[in-house]
Image (cartoon, rainbow, N blue to C red):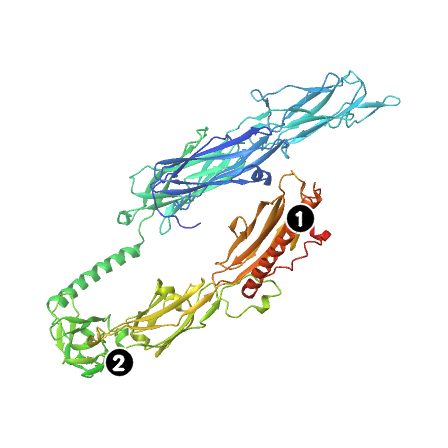
Amino acid sequence: MTSLNPSPRKQYPLSVVLTSSGIDAVVPGSRLELGITVHNIGDRSSIVYVFIEERSPVLRQWCGSMQERLALAPDQSGEVTFQIDVPPAALPEILEYDLVVDGSDSYQDFPPRRYDHYQLQVLPAARVVGGAEEPTFYLEPGSTSNQPLIVQPGIPQALQVWVDNRAERVDRFRLKYIGVPTDWQVTITYPKDTEGLGLVVEADSLGLNPGDRGQILMTVTAPINVLAGIYVPTLRVISANQPDMNLLDLVYLQVNPIYQLQPLLQILRNQVRRQPALFEIQLDNLGNTPRIVQLLVEHLDEPDSCAYMLETEAITLPPQTVQRVLVEGVPQKWWQRPLFGGGRFFNFRVNLQDAEAHPLPINTLPSNLLWLPRPWWQLLLLLLTLLGIIGALVWLIWWLFFKPPVLPQLITFEVADSRYAQANNEFARVNWEIDNFHRVAALTLTGTSPEGEIISTPLTFNFDGRSLPQALIPFCTEQARQLTCTNVRTNASRPGTYTFNLAVRPKGRRPKRPITAESSPVVIDPRPLILPEITDFLPSRLTYQEPGPVSDDEQAALPDNLIDPTGIPLNWLVTNPSEVAGLRLIARGEDDKLLGELRFPLEQSPTGEISLPESLQDFCQLTVSALVCRDVPTGIFQVGTYTFELIVVARTAPEAEADSEPISVITEAITIQPAAPVIAQFQINGQDVQPKYLIPVSKGAPPPIITLTWQILGGATTTAELTPVPGPVPLAGGTALPLNPQGNTLITLQATNQAGDAVTRSVQIETFDPNPEDPAAAAAAAAAAATANAAAEQDAAAAQAGSGDNGGSSSRPTADPDIISPTDVPPRFD
């Protein structure tokens, strides 16, 4: 056991109220709502986790959420409800689970509260009552949920099952049970049968003639350690003639609670010398219900004379178990311990209280502990300590008032050099020599300007004991009482004129005036200014191609100038990056229109180190002499013409060049060309188009309607147009088009991009009357139509030839209108 720290009695900070009594009965097809209310009675806000630990995987399938969380402020309550939906096809059984309320994240000293072995009793759905000729049964004695049968542990409980065979056939019946705990003893006895010459044999079922009644005896014996509660097993009588018939009934059995708790206080060590007194509380739960016992130590002497520590203040005892709780006693006020004699007694008692107000045979357990007197050697040690204190006081008075102080002396203090250069990253350095340095408490080195302003951060070196500060070990040497330091680095590195002051603070409790010295002036020359320069700034290419539609066979033949989604990549080289405060990248479109700007700041540390921004770290390499960047993405990938300007923001600039031109370079015009459009699909009534169609239409019939579908692949600037109607259309779609009942219709699908590249597909549809009234008029009309068709075909061929050079027209040759091929005739429109 680990040592217990003295602390006052603490109340559990979370109060829990459950809607369940521990055993809940439900029928299939219903819902059980399990409510838990938590009240935070502690002094801090808490996150409380409430969850169910199932002992059967079936319960997780019925409960949608097995864990909930509450955020409770002090003196705030919250409620959690678990909904358990029992399916209609659930079989009668008993499911066990545990409830846990855990607030240990906020209250680490208190373990989670557990409510173990809660039961969910699934009852039969309904008792199926047969017809007038079907068998029935009933129980004696009967039981209900309000009047259950009382079962005594270890004593058999007999149940008589009377079965009536109302059928017209001989039948045999067997008795089965569900829901009886496995540790219970169940015996089923059937009436003995007779065979042959009156021979009596054991039977495994009940045989009944038509209209007879028989008895099956069932004996249920609960174990000695059975838990209190109501148990609801299900009895089923199975007919040999009708095995699928459900003859069910419930038996309500109640085990009354037995409250027997035997407390006992045992003394393990009640004499206190150097270790605390130790006692053990033994709690023996001889009953059949779990008990929650709260413990409290009560002082019978002065309240603060002795501290008592309980291992736990509340303990849960399952039935038929024994648990022990340790109690420590530690006397307080060490000065009240007896010097001699028989010692001092401290009386106390442990009060017991049942959390659920169940009876206890003993409520208090009295005891005491003995604080033994001090050993004789402590008296001698006390005497020697008093003599030592008196001697120390005498020596201290002499040291403070009569011994002359020894002060350190600053012999020399000077600068190591009178001039330094910032270009060499040099710091001003000083030398000094101190006598009696072991009397030095601290050194403070300060740099000031000629006007007396502090321009160098003061350095303080503290002397702990007789050892040198870690920062002075590389520069100083010790010889007897003398300390010599050379080339000690100061914080002065910026250009300017410095005068250094060294202050030596002597040791001693009484404040003494520091010993100071001042050096001669020292000059740090500034670094000569070299402005940065952009020596290279250009794109990887001047012309890019917008990605367009490609097939798998064309994948390997893609051009290498396709634009990447990250945009146009740029390259540059900037010299003298130490003088670059940042970069500005400006993008402009056509007509010098400003599109946006990217800024890349270059941070410089106090030591002069330059760091790249995160956006350039993967593309740039920084050296002392140059900043080289390759393929820096700009994010511009749309079709168009662009120029980029790179501006270098210098870190410092001379006054004479304050009005000079900025450091900038502009690229040449960079063009992103659009992708050429492609007609991937053009269909009539779900079939690829042919150059020409002839459709017969009887006179007076309604105009035929065709369905056009198409799909065009292209870039962002690709547009599509379908003529004669509806005109502009989306790149993929479909439309229904009525035809002229007597005449020609030329349908053209054209796709164009921003650069003027175009691709065209055309189809000609001619309708005619298959049964003309006047053959001569029909012949004349056909001739006129043929002439018009020929002219239309020539115009279409000319248009396709003109667009084929730009977009690669995919139009097919036009067939002779007088020759009608069966493959050219679409299905007849009636």
- State the residue in front, 377 or 118: 118
Q: Residue at x 27, y 58 (%)?
A: 381
Estimate the x, y position of residue 249 in percent, counting from the top left: 65, 23
Estimate the x, y position of residue 620 in percent, counting from the top left: 40, 72
Is 229 drawn above or below residue 484 in the view shown?
Answer: above
Which residue corresponds to mark 1? 780
The answer to whether one can see residue 679 in this image is: no
The answer to which quarter of the image holds residue 43 is top left
- State the residue in front, 82 or 643: 643
The answer to which quarter of the image holds residue 475 is bottom left
Is 548 drawn above or below residue 339 in the view shown?
Answer: below
Estimate the x, y position of residue 435 in percent, counting from the top left: 17, 79
- State the residue in front, 27 or 523: 523
Q: Secondary structure at mark 1?
A: helix
Q: Residue at x 73, y 28 (%)?
A: 244
Estimate the x, y position of residue 631 in percent, counting from the top left: 44, 71
Which residue corresponds to mark 2? 423
Q: Amino acid at mark 2?
A: Ala
**Mark 2 packing: few (<14 Cα in 10 Å), some, or many (20+)?**
few
Estimate the spatial distance between the alpha carbons at disc 1 and disc 2, rounded to whole Å: 103 Å
- State the residue in front, 284 or 179: 179
What numbered label is drawn on residue 699?
A: none
The answer to whether one can see residue 781 in this image is: yes
